[in-house]
Image (tube, rainbow, N blue to C red):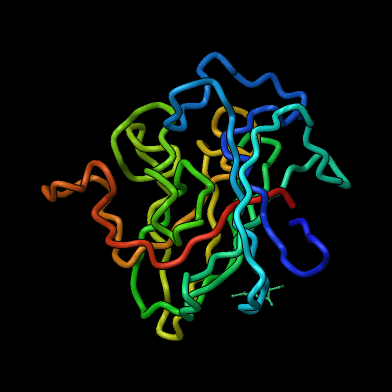
Amino acid sequence: MKCFLLIACVVVAAAAHDGHDHSHSHDHSHSHDHSEKSDQVRAIVKLEEPNGGKVHGNSHSHDHSHSHDHSEKSDQVRAIVKLEEPNGGKVHGNVTFVQEADGKLHVQGVIVGMPAGEYGFHIYEKGDITGGCGSNGEHFNPDNKDHGHPKDEERHAGDLGNVVFNKDEVAHVDFWDHVIKLSGPYSIVGRAIVLHSMADDYGKTEHPDSKRTGNAGHHVACGVIGYL
Ligand SMILES: *[C@@H]1O[C@H](CO)[C@@H](O)[C@H](O)[C@H]1NC(C)=O
Protein backbone atom coordinates (compact mmCIF):
# COMPACT_ATOMS: atom_id res chain seq x y z
CA MET A 1 0.00 0.00 0.00
CA LYS A 2 1.46 3.31 -1.03
CA CYS A 3 -0.10 6.63 -0.26
CA PHE A 4 0.34 9.52 -2.61
CA LEU A 5 0.02 12.91 -0.93
CA LEU A 6 -1.93 11.02 1.73
CA ILE A 7 -4.98 11.44 -0.43
CA ALA A 8 -5.30 8.43 -2.63
CA CYS A 9 -4.04 5.04 -1.54
CA VAL A 10 -3.31 2.34 -4.03
CA VAL A 11 -1.95 -1.10 -4.44
CA VAL A 12 0.60 -1.18 -7.22
CA ALA A 13 -0.37 -4.06 -9.40
CA ALA A 14 3.01 -5.43 -10.31
CA ALA A 15 1.35 -8.10 -12.36
CA ALA A 16 3.57 -10.97 -13.24
CA HIS A 17 6.72 -9.45 -11.85
CA ASP A 18 8.89 -12.40 -10.94
CA GLY A 19 11.92 -10.45 -9.83
CA HIS A 20 10.95 -10.77 -6.21
CA ASP A 21 14.21 -11.90 -4.64
CA HIS A 22 13.79 -14.24 -1.76
CA SER A 23 16.71 -16.44 -2.61
CA HIS A 24 14.60 -19.55 -3.11
CA SER A 25 15.65 -21.33 -6.25
CA HIS A 26 12.38 -21.06 -8.08
CA ASP A 27 11.96 -22.62 -11.43
CA HIS A 28 11.99 -19.74 -13.84
CA SER A 29 12.07 -21.92 -16.89
CA HIS A 30 8.61 -21.04 -17.97
CA SER A 31 8.01 -17.37 -18.15
CA HIS A 32 4.91 -15.60 -17.03
CA ASP A 33 2.15 -15.93 -19.49
CA HIS A 34 -0.06 -12.99 -18.82
CA SER A 35 -1.52 -12.69 -22.25
CA GLU A 36 1.10 -10.39 -23.57
CA LYS A 37 2.45 -10.47 -27.06
CA SER A 38 5.95 -9.57 -25.89
CA ASP A 39 8.38 -9.90 -23.00
CA GLN A 40 7.43 -6.46 -21.86
CA VAL A 41 6.36 -6.54 -18.23
CA ARG A 42 3.60 -4.10 -17.55
CA ALA A 43 1.70 -2.93 -14.52
CA ILE A 44 -1.27 -0.76 -13.83
CA VAL A 45 -2.73 1.08 -10.90
CA LYS A 46 -6.11 2.57 -10.24
CA LEU A 47 -5.80 5.44 -7.79
CA GLU A 48 -8.75 6.04 -5.58
CA GLU A 49 -9.54 8.05 -2.55
CA PRO A 50 -10.65 5.80 0.29
CA ASN A 51 -14.28 6.26 1.31
CA GLY A 52 -15.38 7.35 -2.11
CA GLY A 53 -13.62 10.70 -2.47
CA LYS A 54 -13.33 12.31 -5.88
CA VAL A 55 -9.56 12.02 -6.47
CA HIS A 56 -8.79 9.23 -8.91
CA GLY A 57 -6.71 8.32 -11.92
CA ASN A 58 -4.88 5.61 -13.81
CA SER A 59 -1.16 5.15 -14.28
CA HIS A 60 0.64 2.56 -16.35
CA SER A 61 4.23 1.60 -15.68
CA HIS A 62 6.83 -0.14 -17.78
CA ASP A 63 9.70 0.27 -15.36
CA HIS A 64 11.14 -3.10 -14.49
CA SER A 65 14.47 -2.09 -13.02
CA HIS A 66 13.79 -1.74 -9.33
CA SER A 67 13.84 -4.65 -6.93
CA HIS A 68 11.11 -5.23 -4.40
CA ASP A 69 11.75 -3.70 -1.05
CA HIS A 70 8.73 -4.32 1.04
CA SER A 71 10.18 -3.73 4.47
CA GLU A 72 9.77 -7.14 5.99
CA LYS A 73 10.63 -7.78 9.58
CA SER A 74 11.25 -11.47 8.99
CA ASP A 75 11.82 -13.94 6.21
CA GLN A 76 8.12 -14.67 6.11
CA VAL A 77 6.67 -13.25 2.94
CA ARG A 78 3.16 -11.91 3.37
CA ALA A 79 0.59 -10.26 1.17
CA ILE A 80 -2.84 -8.75 1.63
CA VAL A 81 -5.87 -7.82 -0.40
CA LYS A 82 -8.87 -5.67 0.37
CA LEU A 83 -11.87 -6.99 -1.54
CA GLU A 84 -14.51 -4.49 -2.50
CA GLU A 85 -17.59 -4.34 -4.62
CA PRO A 86 -17.25 -1.75 -7.38
CA ASN A 87 -19.77 1.08 -7.08
CA GLY A 88 -19.91 0.88 -3.33
CA GLY A 89 -21.83 -2.35 -2.76
CA LYS A 90 -21.80 -3.90 0.68
CA VAL A 91 -19.63 -6.93 -0.02
CA HIS A 92 -16.13 -6.40 1.34
CA GLY A 93 -13.36 -8.03 3.26
CA ASN A 94 -9.67 -8.50 3.87
CA VAL A 95 -7.61 -11.57 3.09
CA THR A 96 -3.95 -12.14 3.98
CA PHE A 97 -1.52 -14.61 2.48
CA VAL A 98 1.45 -15.99 4.38
CA GLN A 99 4.12 -18.07 2.68
CA GLU A 100 4.86 -20.96 5.08
CA ALA A 101 8.25 -22.65 5.32
CA ASP A 102 6.81 -25.89 3.89
CA GLY A 103 5.91 -24.06 0.68
CA LYS A 104 2.19 -23.86 1.39
CA LEU A 105 0.41 -20.56 1.34
CA HIS A 106 -1.87 -19.79 4.29
CA VAL A 107 -4.92 -17.86 3.14
CA GLN A 108 -6.87 -16.22 5.94
CA GLY A 109 -9.43 -13.49 6.29
CA VAL A 110 -13.00 -12.33 6.64
CA ILE A 111 -15.40 -11.31 3.89
CA VAL A 112 -18.89 -10.00 4.61
CA GLY A 113 -22.06 -9.18 2.73
CA MET A 114 -23.18 -12.27 0.81
CA PRO A 115 -26.23 -14.40 1.71
CA ALA A 116 -25.50 -17.81 3.24
CA GLY A 117 -23.99 -20.13 0.69
CA GLU A 118 -20.87 -20.98 -1.29
CA TYR A 119 -19.26 -18.65 -3.78
CA GLY A 120 -16.36 -19.12 -6.17
CA PHE A 121 -13.07 -17.56 -5.12
CA HIS A 122 -10.38 -17.24 -7.77
CA ILE A 123 -7.13 -15.48 -8.57
CA TYR A 124 -7.20 -13.72 -11.94
CA GLU A 125 -4.16 -13.24 -14.12
CA LYS A 126 -4.20 -9.45 -14.22
CA GLY A 127 -4.17 -6.92 -11.43
CA ASP A 128 -6.29 -4.63 -13.55
CA ILE A 129 -9.42 -3.49 -11.76
CA THR A 130 -9.69 -0.21 -13.62
CA GLY A 131 -12.92 -1.46 -15.17
CA GLY A 132 -14.34 -2.83 -11.94
CA CYS A 133 -14.04 -6.55 -11.24
CA GLY A 134 -14.37 -7.51 -14.90
CA SER A 135 -11.13 -6.22 -16.40
CA ASN A 136 -8.74 -8.70 -14.80
CA GLY A 137 -8.56 -11.29 -17.55
CA GLU A 138 -9.00 -15.02 -16.97
CA HIS A 139 -8.24 -17.31 -14.05
CA PHE A 140 -4.49 -17.26 -13.30
CA ASN A 141 -3.39 -20.31 -15.23
CA PRO A 142 0.38 -20.41 -15.83
CA ASP A 143 0.31 -24.14 -16.69
CA ASN A 144 -2.53 -23.87 -19.18
CA LYS A 145 -4.71 -26.42 -17.40
CA ASP A 146 -8.46 -26.89 -17.13
CA HIS A 147 -10.44 -25.41 -14.28
CA GLY A 148 -10.74 -27.69 -11.27
CA HIS A 149 -10.99 -28.21 -7.53
CA PRO A 150 -8.08 -26.81 -5.49
CA LYS A 151 -7.05 -30.34 -4.52
CA ASP A 152 -7.12 -31.59 -8.13
CA GLU A 153 -4.00 -32.07 -10.18
CA GLU A 154 -5.88 -30.52 -13.11
CA ARG A 155 -6.66 -27.00 -11.93
CA HIS A 156 -5.74 -23.44 -12.63
CA ALA A 157 -3.21 -22.08 -10.14
CA GLY A 158 -5.87 -19.47 -9.39
CA ASP A 159 -8.57 -21.99 -8.52
CA LEU A 160 -9.16 -21.52 -4.81
CA GLY A 161 -12.58 -23.20 -4.76
CA ASN A 162 -15.43 -21.70 -2.79
CA VAL A 163 -15.78 -19.60 0.32
CA VAL A 164 -18.73 -20.27 2.61
CA PHE A 165 -20.87 -17.48 4.01
CA ASN A 166 -22.97 -18.15 7.12
CA LYS A 167 -26.45 -16.85 7.89
CA ASP A 168 -24.93 -13.65 9.26
CA GLU A 169 -23.42 -13.02 5.81
CA VAL A 170 -19.89 -13.61 7.08
CA ALA A 171 -17.28 -15.87 5.51
CA HIS A 172 -14.28 -16.90 7.60
CA VAL A 173 -11.62 -17.76 5.07
CA ASP A 174 -8.90 -20.06 6.42
CA PHE A 175 -7.12 -22.60 4.26
CA TRP A 176 -3.75 -23.58 2.83
CA ASP A 177 -2.96 -23.86 -0.85
CA HIS A 178 0.01 -25.73 -2.28
CA VAL A 179 0.12 -24.18 -5.78
CA ILE A 180 -0.01 -20.41 -5.45
CA LYS A 181 2.99 -18.55 -4.03
CA LEU A 182 4.08 -15.00 -3.20
CA SER A 183 7.14 -15.12 -5.44
CA GLY A 184 8.28 -16.91 -8.58
CA PRO A 185 6.19 -18.10 -11.51
CA TYR A 186 3.18 -18.93 -9.34
CA SER A 187 3.19 -15.61 -7.54
CA ILE A 188 -0.22 -14.06 -7.03
CA VAL A 189 1.15 -10.67 -5.94
CA GLY A 190 -0.05 -7.98 -8.30
CA ARG A 191 -2.94 -10.10 -9.54
CA ALA A 192 -6.62 -9.74 -8.68
CA ILE A 193 -8.72 -11.98 -6.48
CA VAL A 194 -12.42 -12.25 -7.22
CA LEU A 195 -15.45 -13.35 -5.22
CA HIS A 196 -18.21 -14.64 -7.49
CA SER A 197 -22.00 -14.59 -7.43
CA MET A 198 -22.39 -18.38 -7.59
CA ALA A 199 -20.68 -21.54 -6.38
CA ASP A 200 -17.73 -22.93 -8.28
CA ASP A 201 -18.69 -26.34 -9.69
CA TYR A 202 -14.99 -27.33 -9.76
CA GLY A 203 -15.12 -28.12 -13.47
CA LYS A 204 -17.31 -31.15 -12.73
CA THR A 205 -20.57 -30.32 -14.50
CA GLU A 206 -21.73 -30.40 -18.11
CA HIS A 207 -22.16 -26.64 -18.19
CA PRO A 208 -20.15 -25.19 -21.10
CA ASP A 209 -18.25 -22.86 -18.73
CA SER A 210 -17.50 -25.54 -16.16
CA LYS A 211 -13.99 -26.39 -17.33
CA ARG A 212 -13.07 -22.74 -17.83
CA THR A 213 -14.61 -20.85 -14.92
CA GLY A 214 -16.48 -23.38 -12.80
CA ASN A 215 -19.65 -21.57 -13.90
CA ALA A 216 -19.37 -19.35 -10.83
CA GLY A 217 -21.37 -16.43 -12.20
CA HIS A 218 -20.32 -12.84 -12.31
CA HIS A 219 -17.61 -11.00 -10.40
CA VAL A 220 -19.10 -9.50 -7.24
CA ALA A 221 -16.09 -8.19 -5.34
CA CYS A 222 -12.40 -8.01 -6.04
CA GLY A 223 -9.09 -6.49 -5.10
CA VAL A 224 -5.44 -6.50 -6.14
CA ILE A 225 -3.05 -8.48 -3.95
CA GLY A 226 -0.12 -6.47 -2.62
CA TYR A 227 2.87 -7.14 -0.38
CA LEU A 228 2.36 -6.70 3.33
C1 LIG B 1 -10.66 -4.94 6.89
O1 LIG B 1 -9.63 -4.23 7.54
C2 LIG B 1 -9.99 -2.93 7.94
C3 LIG B 1 -8.75 -2.24 8.48
O2 LIG B 1 -8.17 -3.00 9.48
C4 LIG B 1 -11.10 -3.00 8.96
O3 LIG B 1 -11.51 -1.71 9.31
C5 LIG B 1 -12.27 -3.75 8.36
O4 LIG B 1 -13.27 -3.93 9.34
C6 LIG B 1 -11.84 -5.10 7.84
N1 LIG B 1 -12.98 -5.72 7.17
C7 LIG B 1 -13.41 -6.93 7.48
C8 LIG B 1 -14.60 -7.41 6.74
O5 LIG B 1 -12.88 -7.64 8.32
Report the front residue among 163 and 17: 17
Q: Is residue 184 above or below residue 49?
A: above
Count of all numbered marks drawn on residues in the image: 0
Where's residue 5, x and y in %?
83, 64
Q: Residue at x 67, y 42 (%)?
A: 99
Residue 157 position (above or below residue 225): above
Residue situated furthest left in the rendering? 206
- Front residue of this view, candidates 223 and 157: 223
Q: Residue at x 57, y 25 (%)?
A: 40
Q: Is residue 10 left or right of residue 148?
A: right
Residue sitting at 45 percent across and 86 percent down?
168
Q: Which of the 4 image quadrants contains residue 219?
A: bottom left
- Residue lying farthest bottom? 168
Q: Which of the 4 image quarters holds residue 47?
A: bottom right
Quadrant containing the N terminus in the rendered view: bottom right
Asked if residue 3 lies left or right of residue 19, the reply is: right
Q: Is residue 5 left or right of residue 155?
A: right
Give the residue at x 48% y 81%.
90
- Within the displayed image, which quadrant is ligand 1 positioned in? bottom right
Viewer-nearest residue: 4 or 73: 4
Residue 73: x and y, percent?
A: 88, 47
Q: Could you tell me residue 133's position as x and y percent?
A: 43, 60
Q: Position of residue 159 (x, y in %)?
A: 40, 45
